[in-house]
Image: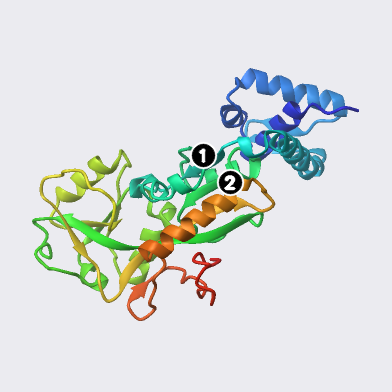
Amino acid sequence: MDLDVAQVRAFVRVAEELHFGRAAGTLAISQQALSKRIARLENLLGTALFERGGNGVRLTDAGHRFLQPARHTVAAADAAVAAVAGENRPLRVDVWGHLYAPMRTLAQVAGRAGELVPGHGRDLPSVTAALMRGDIDAAFGRVHPPLHAGLTHRLVRLEPVDVVLSTTHPLAAEPALRPDQLRGSVLWSPGALDRLDFLHQFADRFGIRDRTASLNLGLTHFLTEVAASAARFSLLPADVPLPEVPGLRTVPLVDPTPLYAWSLVWRTGNDHPGLNTLTAACATAAARSRWLEYSPAHDWLPEPPAPHPQDRSQEIPQS
C-alpha cells in the first residue's frame, strides 16, 4: 500500500483543526479538493478516519491510531525535501504579537542571519501549529506556558514596558509611574484579555480591576482609543515606534519595571542550518545592546528567565 503524502497531510490538517474549511485554508486548496483527498485516503485504508455530523468533525478510533504515524510520515517527507534543498532554502520565520512590532527586533539581526522569509502569524497557538506542521522553521514572539512539548524556545530580548495614556489622564504629567499607581485606571487591551497573557498577568499582579477589551484594528486605532479617555491606559514595549496620535503620552514604569520577553521558537529536531545562524545573530545583538539584563529587585516578569550561563559568550539563556 503506497500512501499519497498530500492525502496524509490533508488528514493531519483536518485532525488538527477539526474543521474542513480551516484545514483547507491552511493548505491553500478548496474544501472540495480537501474532502476528495480525505475520501481517497479513507478508501485506500478501508476505514473512516472522521465522523462528520452536526456537531462538527471528530476522529474515529482508527483516525486516532493513524494520527501520530501520519504526522511522522509528513515530517519525514518534509525532511526529505529539505535535505535536497539543503542550505539553499531560506529560513522561514514567523512572528506574532504584531501590535508590539516584533519585526523591529528581527530587523536588527536580519543582516547577520542569512536569508529569511518572514510570515505573519496570528498568535502563539496558530504559530505553534505551523511549526509542528513544518510550514515554518522558527517563530519570534512572547512565549508563555504551556508550550507544545515538541518545541524548543530561547530567550532573545527583555524589553522595558512603558504605560501609554491620555494627556488628560490625572497621572500624565508624572515623569515615571509605579505599576500600582494605575489601580484606579482602566486597562484598555487590544482584544480579549484572556488571550493576552502579559496584560492579563500584569493586571492581576498589580491589582488593576477595571479592564476593557477593544477590537484590534491596528496600533494607530488602538492608541487613538486610549487617548480618547482620561481614565484609560495600556502598555507597550518602550522601543515600539508610535504613530502620531494627538493627546497621547508615554511614561516609563519603575519599581518594578515590567519587562516583555521576546523568544525564538523552533521545532525540536529541525536541523536547518539557518537556525544556528539566526540564534548566533540574536546572541550577538543581545550582547551588543544589553537585551538580556534583568534584576529581580527592580524588574517584573510574569515568568522570570533561567539564570544566565556562566559563559558570557552564550548570550541567549535557555528559557
Q: How is the model colour-coded?
A: rainbow
Query: What percent of the width, then of the height, locates residue 69?
Result: 80, 42
Q: Position of residue 177 (x, y in %)?
A: 19, 70
SS under mark 1? loop
User: Please, what is the three-letter code of the amino acid marked with disc 1?
Assistant: Glu
Mark seen at residue 115: 1
Q: Residue at x 25, y 45 (%)?
A: 222
Q: Residue at x 60, y 22 (%)?
A: 29
Q: Is residue 132 among the parts visible in the rendering? A: yes
Please state the horizontal and vertical placement of residue 178, each as a whole percent of the image: 23, 72
Please tell me which of labels 1 and 2 falls first in the chain.
1
Residue 76 is drawn in which quadrant? top right
Please rate how many residues cluster around mark 1, counting C-alpha atoms within 10 Å: few if below 14, some from 14 to 19, many from 20: some
Quick check: 110 left or right of 41?
left
Task: From the image, tell me which residue sits under label 2.
Answer: 274
Image location (x, y in percent) of residue 63: 78, 38
Q: Is residue 30 above or below residue 269?
A: above
Identify which amino acid the numbered label 2 is placed on.
Gly
- Residue at image coords 48%, 60%: 283
Query: Do tag 1 and tag 2 residues touch (Cβ < 8 Å)?
Result: yes
